Amino acid sequence: MFTGLIEQTSPVLSINKTSALTELEIKNTTFDDLNIGDSIAVNGVCLTVTKLEEQSFFVEIVNETNKITSLSELRNGDLLNLERAMRLDQRLGGHIVSGHVDGTGVIAGIYNDGDALVITVECPRELMKYMTLKGSVTIDGISLTLFDINLENNTFILNIIPETQSKTALGQKKQGDIVNIEADMMIKHIDHLLNFEKAGGTHV
């Protein structure tokens, strides 16, 4: 589990693609307690550390993860949002994030409003039901607030404060870029239970 508060941004050092999987090498200058087998959110995708070097670590991406996330679009040098799995003794400053991406969206518009970076995201229609005004959404692993929602256009608007711009890779995004979306976990579970009962399901 994660909080959506990015701990470190680091570039992709190398990408090794085969027909079976993709291996990423990611620069590491901050995390001195990583171990092989640890979970780490990479642009919001929960991956497993498979190898450690002195100033880098490796993760593997299976084909299905490449299909449903933006990780397949990565190139050498791209900056990544990183967060280690949360500890039970830490403050939950963002919201509960699983690292299981629900789909990808496209940045449809981006501009500055004072110090805020205003981003419009075009979202898959099936995910729009989880987008609630002033609710939470995870974009590329970042816990953010939904400032406006347009159901007709399947879009939502985010206002990114300077702190988030400087501490994450979101400030480098441009129109047309693909982002990973994870909807609020509690809303998804409530929706599942309601639809399960409507479909005639029973609980044990």
Image (cartoon, helix red, strand yellow):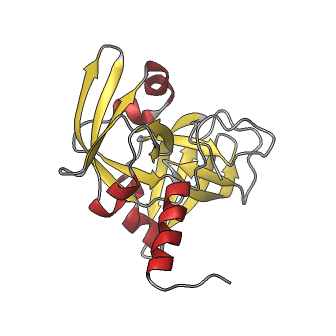
- x 53%, y 49%: residue: 42
Which residue sits furthest left? 152
Q: Position of residue 63 (x, y in %)?
A: 44, 72
With respect to residue 169, does 136 lie above or below?
A: below
Residue 79 lies in what quarter of the image?
top left
Residue at x 58%, y 50% (from the top left corner): 97
Image quadrant assignment for residue 99: bottom right
Judge whether 137 appears above or below 157 on screen: below
Residue 93 drawn at (x, y percent): 63, 34
Is 52 or 97 nearer to us in this picture?
97
Q: Report the residue at 54% width, 51% height from top.
A: 25
- In the image, 188: left or right of 90? left
Nearer the observer, 188 or 161? 188
Q: Position of residue 51 (x, y in %)?
A: 67, 57
Looking at the image, residue 97 lies above or below residue 33: below
Using the image as rendered, state which of residue 17 and residue 44 is in the foreground: 44
Q: Residue furthest right?
A: 89
Q: How many numbered callouts? A: 0
- Which residue is found at the position 41% from the left and 65% from the top? 66
Q: Residue furthest top?
A: 114
In the image, is 90 to the left or to the right of 140?
Answer: right
Q: Position of residue 4 (x, y in %)?
A: 56, 42
Q: Nearer the viewer, residue 148 or 35?
A: 148
Vertical placement of residue 127 versus 28, above or below: below
Q: Quadrant of the C terminus?
A: bottom right
Image quarter of residue 146:
top left
